[in-house]
Amino acid sequence: MQVSVILAHPDPASFNHGIARVVLEALAPTSARVNFHDLCKEQFEPLLPAEEVAKDVTLPALVAAHCREIAEADLIIIIHPNWWGQPPAMLKGWIDRVVRPGVAYEFLEGDSGEGVPIGLLRAKLALVFNTSNTEVLREQQVFGDPLETIWKNCIFGLCGVAEVRRKTFAIVITSTEEQRRSWLAEVRRQVEEACAQLSESQ
């Protein structure tokens, strides 16, 4: 089993980094091959250049490696804060450059790009862990929970990932140590359950 873990938060002391550590700890006892990327630490270039837009182009080595990893992953885990109802710009740029045609999706022959694409990703399960300083109910009722739509419908749903489990931890800024420990236990449980599910299906 191959697992791709993507973290997008600029502060190493953030709770997002705490989530990532627990994710990696939960994966360590398994036989999974784990590809972990802290995009901010690695200074991934998020700007999609014009020469990369076309499907059949030669990609820079780093971007090509990211594409290969995401295409081969059985489980994809994304960790990021909710910033203005969206992923951080770093992660959005990673999506633009890596979740690309020929890697994550393609169109039917004769379709010039106006239709509904066919998903290519091998992963059948994705976990998305978000942090937020907005109450979950308010996020849903007032803002329509845009991250739910982005990850489930606009990205993974179109790229062939059948099941997306997303968990938001809020409100982080006023959370207690006890609450954070409980949240991290939930992260560990979800990762362990996902690995067990995928192991049984292989």
Image (spheres, rainbow, N blue to C red):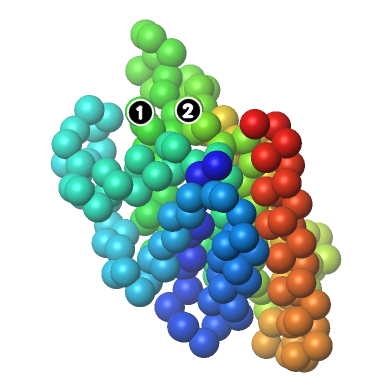
Q: On the rendered image, what quadrant is the C terminus found in?
A: top right
Look at the numbered discs 2 and 1 and tell me whether their residues touch, using CB distance below 8 Å: yes
Asked if residue 158 shows in the view, the reply is: no
Query: Is label 1 in a helix, a strand or a loop?
Result: loop
Whole-percent x, y for residue 167 in the image: 72, 60
Q: Nearer the viewer, residue 84 or 172?
A: 172
- In the image: residue 108, left or right of residue 151: left
Whole-percent x, y for residue 31 in the image: 57, 50
Residue visible at 25% across and 38% down? 53
Q: Is residue 178 above or below residue 20?
A: below
Q: Nearer the viewer, residue 111 or 189?
A: 189
- Residue on which disc 1 sits: 102
Q: On the rendered image, what quadrant is the N terminus found in?
A: top right
Q: Earlier in the sequence, mark 2 or mark 1?
A: 1
Q: CA distance from mark 2 to mark 1?
A: 8 Å
Residue visible at 58% across and 45% down? 75
Q: Nearer the viewer, residue 118 or 83?
A: 118
- Residue on which disc 2 sits: 120
